[in-house]
Image: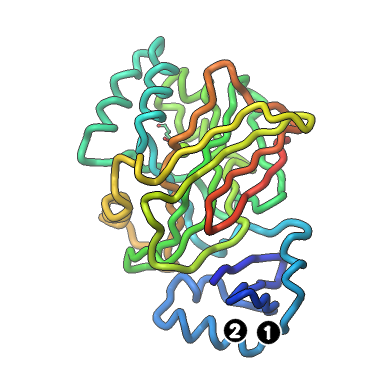
Amino acid sequence: MKLYKRGEGTVILIDERAVSIEGFDWNLLFVGDDRRAHLEEAISRGTEIPIETLAKGGFDPPIADQEIWAAGVTYHRSRDARMDESRESGGESFYDRVYRAERPELFYKGSVRTAVGHRQAVRVRSDSRWNVPEPELTLAIDPAGCVFGFTVGNDMSSREIEGENPLYLPQAKIYDGSCALGPCLLVTDGLPESTEITLRVLRERTVVFDGATTLSRMARPFSVLTEFLYRENTFPVGAYLMTGTGIVPPDDFTLKPGDETAVGIVPIGTLENTVT
Ligand code: DO4
Ligand code: MG
């Protein structure tokens, strides 16, 4: 089942049927004492709409009051890129150490305030000259720490600022329009390790970056990431957790205003954004 959010409305895609619902409670979906009953009740009072409607326009990020967190250096490619960018600042060894440590890197990524949805604008910071998208599978987690769904995430990052000093990480990562989520939330128990994540960047209709990875390359299981996140934190309405990037463009690549990013994860969908 896939859930799409647009203004006050939600569209639920179930068995090739699209059902539009007004006033769907997204927090209740996350809290989920009886998630199936909540969804069935919503579908029963919804209106069926043509499935083609979903291909048109954009969507809001599939979020209500959840906090968004992110894991870092969960793929070898991210470790290597971070070591390169922080060599001069002396921060290089931190990334290798965290890649091998028991405790993962986890950082706050914002909330609905910093998030945008499918076909909405992501931003690069005006005080940074080196900016990249980070395509990341993103977990939807209930208050008990159980993963009940997945969305596609883009952890927009300033490599210039984080490379200058690892202590600047929050500024490199959290600002208006720094996190894209969508196009929908897929409610399901799990995804296979063979799941592919792709990133494509278009500039004036030309592909300027294209990359792919699979979940099998992740260095840590989801259960370890969620266990550490929930260890000393209570999330009364659940949380989103971005699971880190395994795709990093070459060091001479930076996003430019007008670029279009497309992050794809089958079976969730493709999250498209324009950079401003
Ligand atoms: O430590 C820097 C951030 C790492 C990150 O965001 C990632 O690996 O995806
Ligand atoms: Mg990231």
Disc 2: which residue: 42
Q: Can residue 232 be seen in this view?
A: no
State which quarter of the image contains the C terminus. top right
Residue found at the far top of this picture: 88
Residue type of the residue flagged with mark 2: Ala
Residue 65 percent coordinates (x, y):
53, 63
Q: Which residue is drawn at 28% across and 25% down?
A: 96
User: What residue is at 72 percent from the left and 84 percent from the top?
Assistant: 47
Q: Which mark is residue 46?
A: 1
Can you say which quadrant of the picture contains the N terminus?
bottom right
Q: Residue at x 40, y 62 (%)?
A: 141
Q: Is mark 1 on a helix, strand or loop?
A: loop
Left or right of residue 92, residue 127 in this image: right
User: Does any atom of ligand 2 lie closer than 8 Å to the CB of label 1?
Assistant: no
Whether residue 84 is situated above or below residue 158 in the rendered picture: above
| 22 left or right of 180 in image | right
**Residue at the farthest left position:** 102
Residue 92 image position (x, y, % from top left): 34, 18
Residue most toward the front?
194
Picture coordinates of residue 120, whole percent (x, y): 71, 49
